[in-house]
Image (cartoon, rainbow, N blue to C red):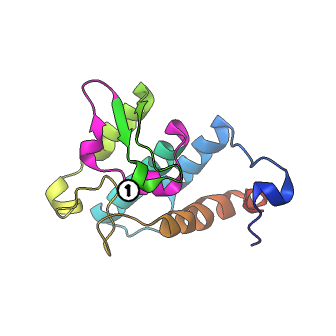
Amino acid sequence: MTNYLYSQTKQLPEILEETEINKILNKIMISEDYPKSNYGLWMKNRDATLIATIYILGLRPKEACTLRLDDFNFKNSYVKIRGVNNKIKKDRVLPVPKILLNILKTYLNFPRARYWRGSSYLFPSAESPHISAGRLKHIFREKCLKPLGLCALLH
């Protein structure tokens, strides 16, 4: 896969339609690529919630992967994005739409002691405290775009 920068191509990146995002999230939830266990169900929810968070809030992959549970203020519906995880190195606060609050609520209903294993990150990994941006890209490409025939978005 060739990775083109905007400055090289002068083209804006593809923007996915809401129907395409819904197909992607549904594809994750019906995927056979996850373990057939409660842990696999949690992983599906983690991955779908991560992708929904990126698209609903307009985050960069690293920003989403490194979100902490305490970055969210669920009572007042906002999230703090840490500048250390973005290219402009500035913190910002974003409102969290109700649709994302509902998705997060479902995801956070899984027992934290069992699935988060003490990680303070919203999207933990079995190998590290949080899922990596590289792993997210792999999940998105292999479990979503390729099976749905949306590979043209990779170029």
Judge from the rendering whether residue 119 lies leftward or rightward of residue 138; answer left or right.
left
Instruction: Please state the extent of the stretch shown in magenta in the rendering.
Output: 55-77
Is residue 146 visible from the viewing direction of this image? yes
The residue tagged 1 is 66
In the rendered structure, which amino acid carries the disc numbered 1?
Thr
Q: Quadrant of residue 6?
A: bottom right
The quadrant of the image that shows the N terminus is bottom right
Q: Is residue 59 magenta?
A: yes
In this view of the protein, can residue 47 be seen by the observer? no
Picture coordinates of residue 43, whole percent (x, y): 37, 60
Query: Which quadrant would the C terminus be assigned to in this image?
Result: bottom right
Q: Nearer the viewer, residue 149 or 136?
A: 136
Pinpoint residue 131: horizontal percent, then vertical percent.
39, 64
Query: Where is 97 relative to 3, above or below?
Result: above
The reply, left or right, for residue 144 in relation to residue 152 is left
Q: What residue occupies the far bottom of the structure in this picture? A: 127
- Viewed as shown, does residue 10 lie left or right of 146? right
- Where disc 1 sits, the SS reads loop
Residue 17 locus on image (x, y percent) = 69, 38
